[in-house]
Image (tube, rainbow, N blue to C red):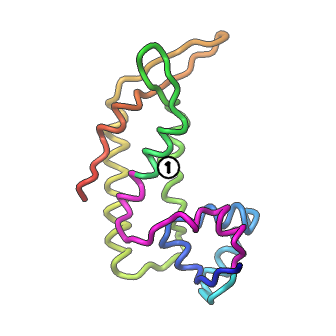
Amino acid sequence: MTIKIHPEDIVRRCLWDNYVYYILAGSDKEAERILAANEEMEISEKDALVIGLLKVIDTDNLIHKFNNHVVEFLTNKSIKHSDLLLVRKKAFDYSVDKFLDKFPDYWEPKSTYVSALADLVGYIDAMKKDLEGLEIHKIVDKNVTYEFYNSASIKKMLKFNY
């Protein structure tokens, strides 16, 4: 089975970074060319499965998509230590920073996505400021100190009523 889709639709579904990495092998020049042309293309069911196209819902509520990304990250990456669920600080901060890579600089969004993207950037910036105030748990393993956030504290920071 093949799926016909425009490159802009991949960006709007927050999958562009996955498409560039897995399908285009990280070629930013090719990605920019494809997105600029924005011509309908066919992708295989296998490629759609790899980038996550088969399980995504199209919406312009980007804050909701970001929140889902954070919850999924916390679900998959949290570890149990004592009676707390902790997530590595460095990994979580990187994940938050990389979310905006789903919307490349060379993409010219439609008006509804311009405001949604601006809201998302503001939401992420506010979250980063709140993260600075969170308690950091330090765990020493084999003479190396790792820093962790409490996963529950991060979940409490998320606002789902947008």
Pick the front one: 56 or 19: 56
Based on the displayed image, in which of its 4 quarters is residue 52 positioned? bottom right
- Looking at the rendered image, the quarter that the C terminus falls into is bottom left
Tell whether 27 sits left or right of 98: right
* 14 vs 128: above or below: below
* 80 vs 94: above or below: above
- Looking at the rendered image, the quarter that the N terminus falls into is bottom right
Residue assigned mark 1? 97
What residue is shown at x 50% (from left), y 65% (from top)?
A: 56
Residue 158 location (% of width, % of height): 31, 45
- Mostly what secondary structure, the magenta segment? helix
Residue 16 location (% of width, % of height): 58, 67
- Taking the view exactly as shown, the residue that stands out farthest to the front is 1
What residue is shown at x 37% (from left), y 71% (from top)?
A: 60
- Taking the view exactly as shown, the residue that stands out farthest to the left is 161
Disc 1 marks a residue whose amino acid type is: Asp
* 84 vs 96: above or below: above
Q: Which residues are magenta?
A: 43-67
